[in-house]
């Protein structure tokens, strides 16, 4: 196990698991061995990732009965219909309850494979092998799994933890620049919600991250995973503080759903959503104008959008935001900022601040 640069543990009692971060680890049999229980393994991936990484992953699992299920690529395929293809492949291959599913891909593959694992024969093991920056710093950790509905993002799903996460930094070499930036949105999110020191580090190191400096990337992934694991350990099923991880997501999900899945990347929508949350926090009198500017600057530096699409009117935003999972008893709750590194989930905001934030973009 020489290639691992860092091991973190997600401590959730009997559902605990390790996260390994390093270059070349996805193709190393040693990492899988102690986490694959039965003899059958189904690798779920998509048609973009399969030619790049499927053979070597299957090779690393060569002692097992290995099959693969290759799905179409795209957020628009994160649906119940496409999920059904995974169940069909498992049934055709006579996979038993002792099987292990391997999610080889970005957040779409990870979320769908995790949900298939949670529900196939009432639950089988699964392993996350995230291959995008976004999935390495966020979606592969914490056990949120699921699919989209035409009326709302991630509306069908389950909390279901993986047995192991293998975040292989070498896979990021084939990722395009737009996807790298999309992942950086979730990295910036951790600085904003709980880690002001990390935000400052990001201000100094954003250019190195964009240039894919391996040391800077490995550090950002480690620190992000630690932030996420801490929050998840304290509130696995989002009865409270875990909702902080959704900074910018209520606005962002409205953008993704409203524009049609796949049009805006998840991280792009979250980045703009974080700017909108910052603007609203400033209007609330919580966040200083100077901090707000620092947030816009860092997000722009990461080559991410800071204003929402003109096509979405304020009225449409409000309509879409009403479907958010943070709506409780008809009241919209938002993640807002007190300062950089300090956030809260609240329904106690002035409604006019929300409408002013939405209408200032001229939509
Ligand atoms: P994605 O899974 O769509 O991957 C982005 C693109 O990159 C795809 O075209 C994919 O085929 C390609 N790709 C993946 N790895 C590659 C590689 N190494 N080289 C070249 N191309 C590669 O998108 P994403 O940004 O990884 O994930 C977004 C999804 O994650 C959304 O559906 C979002 O809702 C979900 N998400 C879930 C959680 C969670 O906690 N479960 C958290 C954040 C986001
Ligand atoms: N990405 C939000 C969460 O995992 O809770």
Image (tube, rainbow, N blue to C red):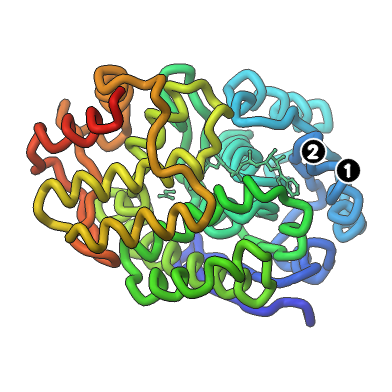
Q: How many marks?
A: 2
Disc 2 beta carbon < 8 A from ligand 1? yes
- Looking at the rendered structure, the secondary structure element under dot 1 is helix
Label 2 close to label 1 by CB (< 8 Å): yes
Q: Can you identify the residue that label 2 sits on?
A: 48
Residue at 72 percent across and 31 percent down: it is 73
Residue at 71 percent across and 30 percent down: it is 86
What quarter of the picture does the N terminus occupy? bottom right
Q: Give left or right: position of 234 versus 305.
A: left
Point out residue 272 in the picture as x, y percentages from the top left corner: 40, 42
Disc 1 beta carbon < 8 A from ligand 1? no
Instruction: Report whether residue 125 is seen.
Output: no
Residue at 48 percent across and 66 percent down: it is 224
Q: Give left or right: position of 136 versus 60.
A: left
Q: Give left or right: position of 268 versus 216.
A: left
Q: Can you identify the residue that label 1 sits on?
A: 51
Q: Quadrant of residue 200?
A: bottom left
Label 2 packing within 10 angstroms: few (<14), some (14-19), many (20+): some
Residue at 58 percent across and 67 percent down: it is 207
Structural distance between the alpha carbons of marks 2 and 1: 7 Å
């Amino acid at each position: 196990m020489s290639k691992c640069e860092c091991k973190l543990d997600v401590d959730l009692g009997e559902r605990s698991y390790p996260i390994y971060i390093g270059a070349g680890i996805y193709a190393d049999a040693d990492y899988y061995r102690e986490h694959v229980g039965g003899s059958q393994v189904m690798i779920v991936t998509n048609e973009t990732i399969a030619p790049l990484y499927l053979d070597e992953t299957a090779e690393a699992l060569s002692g097992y009965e290995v099959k693969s299920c290759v799905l179409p690529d795209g957020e628009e395929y994160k649906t119940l219909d496409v999920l059904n293809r995974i169940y069909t492949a498992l049934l055709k291959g006579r996979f038993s309850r002792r099987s292990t599913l391997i999610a080889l891909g970005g957040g779409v593959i990870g979320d769908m494979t995790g949900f298939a694992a949670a529900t196939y024969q009432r639950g089988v093991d699964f392993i996350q092998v995230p291959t995008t920056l976004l999935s390495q710093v966020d979606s592969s950790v914490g056990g949120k799994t699921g699919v989209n509905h035409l009326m709302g993002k991630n509306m069908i799903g389950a909390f279901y933890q993986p047995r192991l996460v293998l975040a292989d930094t070498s896979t990021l070499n084939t990722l395009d620049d737009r996807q790298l930036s999309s992942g950086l949105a979730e990295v910036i999110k951790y600085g904003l919600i709980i880690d002001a020191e990390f935000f400052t580090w990001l201000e100094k190191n954003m250019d190195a991250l964009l240039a894919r400096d391996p040391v800077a990337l490995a550090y950002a992934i480690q620190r992000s995973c630690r932030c996420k694991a801490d929050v998840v350990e304290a509130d696995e099923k989002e009865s409270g503080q875990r909702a902080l991880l959704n900074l910018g997501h209520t606005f962002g999900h409205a953008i993704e759903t409203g524009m049609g899945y796949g049009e805006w990347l998840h991280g792009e929508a979250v980045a703009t959503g974080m700017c909108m949350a910052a603007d609203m926090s400033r209007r609330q009198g919580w966040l200083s104008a100077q901090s707000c500017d620092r947030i816009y600057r860092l997000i722009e530096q990461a080559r991410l959008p800071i204003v929402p699409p003109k096509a979405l009117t304020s009225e449409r935003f409000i309509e879409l935001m009403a479907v958010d999972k943070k709506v409780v008893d008809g009241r919209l709750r938002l993640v807002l900022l007190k300062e950089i590194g300090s956030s809260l989930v609240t329904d106690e905001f002035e409604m006019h601040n929300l409408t002013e934030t939405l209408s200032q973009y001229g939509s």
